[in-house]
Amino acid sequence: MEIGPREHAAALYYHIAGDALKCARKEANNGKDEFCLAQYVCASMVFSALTLEAYINQEYTLHLPTSRIKVEQLNTHNKWTKLPLLLGNCTTFNNNKAPYPTFTELVYLRNNVLVHFKGGPINNTETTKPSSVVKPFSVIVKDWERANNYFECIAAMIKQLNALTSGQTSLPGFLTGERYLATFAVDMPQGIDVL
């Protein structure tokens, strides 16, 4: 029997992204402090990406703890597209169908514009510049509507993964507003009644 806490970094990151987005909306309507708006938008975008990364890493840990696949060597895109296949589905995300293009744009922005600025040419497939990312940094970080699209992408990606895995992956409580950092995982032996 295994009893212990299961950490949920994705839940914390989701709420940071959402709370920052609410502040960004208020600041955009207020229109007085563009730097403050940029802080909130940037925080929401970065934490939206972190939510998706933490969530997919958690799902790999839960479903493939002893897999021969070295998860840490997969890029974020591969983690999302391979998991449905590894869990027995014949199909995976369609790269050209929502929400995947928004996810691709978010990962690109997080990795190449917001967190790890890469000024030179980009050659690998994870960082291929989406055509929709053509605005300067100073414009992107004040675009609260773009941040909103990325935040909505979190639920869309998680729900689509759940559908692609025939319900094998979780639909976390944070999508419905629950705030938590950990839950306890308990495997009960057969025949024991829980009061």
Image (tube, rainbow, N blue to C red):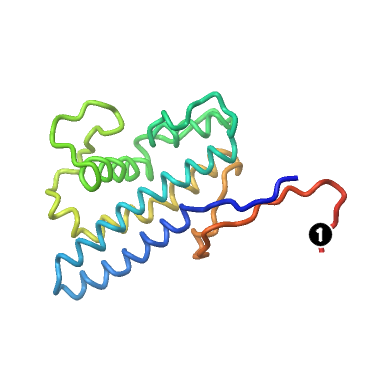
| Percent of width and height locating residue 95 | 36, 34
Q: Report the side of 83 relative to 75 (left or right).
A: right
Q: Is residue 102 left or right of residue 114?
A: right
Secondary structure, mark 1, is loop
Q: Which residue is mark 1?
A: 194
Q: Residue at x 30, y 54 (%)?
A: 45
- Residue 96: name its quadrant: top left
Residue 109 vs residue 172: left or right?
Answer: left
Tell me the crowding category of disc 1: few under 14, some 14 to 19, or many 20 or more residues within 10 angstroms, Cα based: few
Q: Three-letter amino acid code at disc 1?
A: Val
Residue that appears at 70% across and 51% down = 186
Q: Quadrant of residue 104?
A: top left
The residue lying at 15 percent from left, 73 percent from top is 31
The quadrant in which the C terminus is found is: bottom right
Q: Quadrant of residue 139?
A: bottom left
Query: Looking at the image, is 51 positioned above or below residue 117?
Result: below
In the picture, the quarter occupied by the N terminus is top right
Q: Position of residue 34 (x, y in %)?
A: 14, 66
Front residue of 156/171: it is 171
Does 125 sit above or below residue 115?
above
Residue drawn at the location 47% of the way across and 53% of the way down: 9
Residue 50: x %, y % from top left: 38, 49
Whole-percent x, y for residue 177 in the image: 49, 65
- The count of marks equals 1
| Residue closest to the eye, 40 or 85 | 40
The answer to which of 109 and 12 lies nearer the viewer is 12
Residue furthest to the right: 191
Single out the residue that lies furthest toward the top: 68
